[in-house]
Image (cartoon, rainbow, N blue to C red):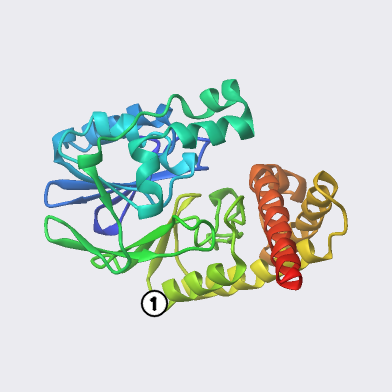
Amino acid sequence: MEDVTAYPHGVLALDSGYGGAQMAAIHLVMHEGQVAIIDTAHNAAVPRVLGALAAAGVAPECVRWVMLTHIHLDHAGGAGSLMCALPNAKLLVHPRGARHMIDPSRLWQSTCEVYGAQKAFELYGRLAPVPQERVVQASDGMVVELAGREFEILDTPGHARHHICIYDRVGNAFFTGDTFGVSYRQLDADGRASVIPATTPTQFDLQAAHRSIDRLLSYQPQAMFLTHYSRVTDVPRLGDDLHRLLDAFVAVAQAARGENEARCAEIRAGLEEIIREEAERQAWPLPVEEALRVLHEDLELNAQGLAFWMEQQRQAIDAAVAN
């Protein structure tokens, strides 16, 4: 299939189609005739997943796990519908996210508040619930198996409080969701990847993000599989870049002086300047304006997340002073 990329150790990256070409990957791990699927994208990706399984000669009954790094809908919107097609699979999800997979009504409501009901439906389709008995809550340090292949679960807040990363001991690689940022192949310079932090609303936490990145790096992995978009190597360099850019993003947010939408717009403009500098530093092959278009949605959400985080910091300081 044109939208599937095969990597060592039985890992396939499937282009979900969400947001355009090579913007959101679904990863399939195949081992001894069994399959684990990491993240699901939106409902429209379900036929792509089933097509990839068929092309690999694997029946849906052979899928044992659907693992969600977190429940943001570009990662988990199709989970309920996909589970309906995979009769033997269990859904692995952070304990904070489990109830929203079992009953997605509040998750859907909050999505509609952001996008409006029509736009939310266009983006994700209707969210299907997952039966409670098929949901497994992922605790920190937990090990799950796929035909003897072990995956270790790490609780990795920073991007979201309901975020896990999944360590594949066979491949010495992590499936990182958004904890290790976003890295689009369009921006690779002669095969050299770049990475941008994901500080999206509403649970960004700077110190937790730094700690989670360091925890992943402590395993000395050979590769990271990001949802946005798939496999990167040269992991120590990218980790250093993430730390540097996280601090630069936060410095922009702390310098912003506007209120509400004005503050968000000021942060957005500051992030654009950082990206312009990063484009030159990393020698991105795209013209900078085109690179900004690739990163448009990420920068919008990052600015919103940073503005929300700054407001939380202000409220915490006010509360401390009042007490």
* Direction right: furthest residue: 257
Q: Position of residue 169 (x, y in %)?
A: 25, 68
Q: Position of residue 307 (x, y in %)?
A: 73, 54
Q: Is residue 141 above or below residue 147?
A: below
Relative to the observer, which residue lies in front, 289 or 196?
196
Q: Is residue 100 above or below residue 246?
A: above
What residue sits 37% from the left and 70% below the top?
A: 222
Q: How many marks?
A: 1
What residue sits 75% from the left and 51% below the top?
A: 288
Q: Is residue 305 left or right of residue 251?
A: left
Q: Secondary structure at mark 1?
A: loop
Judge whether residue 37 can be spotted in this image: yes
What residue sits 14% from the left and 40% below the top?
A: 62
Q: Position of residue 71 (x, y in %)?
A: 44, 45
Amino acid at pointer 1: Gln
Q: Is residue 180 above or below residue 125?
A: below
Which quadrant of the rendered structure holds the N terminus? top left
Mark 1 highlights which residue? 220
Rate crowding at label 1 as few (under 14), some (14 to 19) or many (20 or more) other CA atoms within 10 Å. Answer: few
Q: Quadrant of residue 44?
A: top left
Which quadrant of the rendered structure holds the C terminus? bottom right
Q: Quadrant of residue 3?
A: top left
Judge whether residue 20 can be spotted in this image: no
Q: Is residue 64 left or right of residue 292?
A: left
* Direction top: furthest residue: 118
Q: Is residue 121 left or right of residue 323?
A: left
Q: Position of residue 10 (x, y in %)?
A: 24, 53
What residue sits 35% from the left and 54% below the top?
A: 95
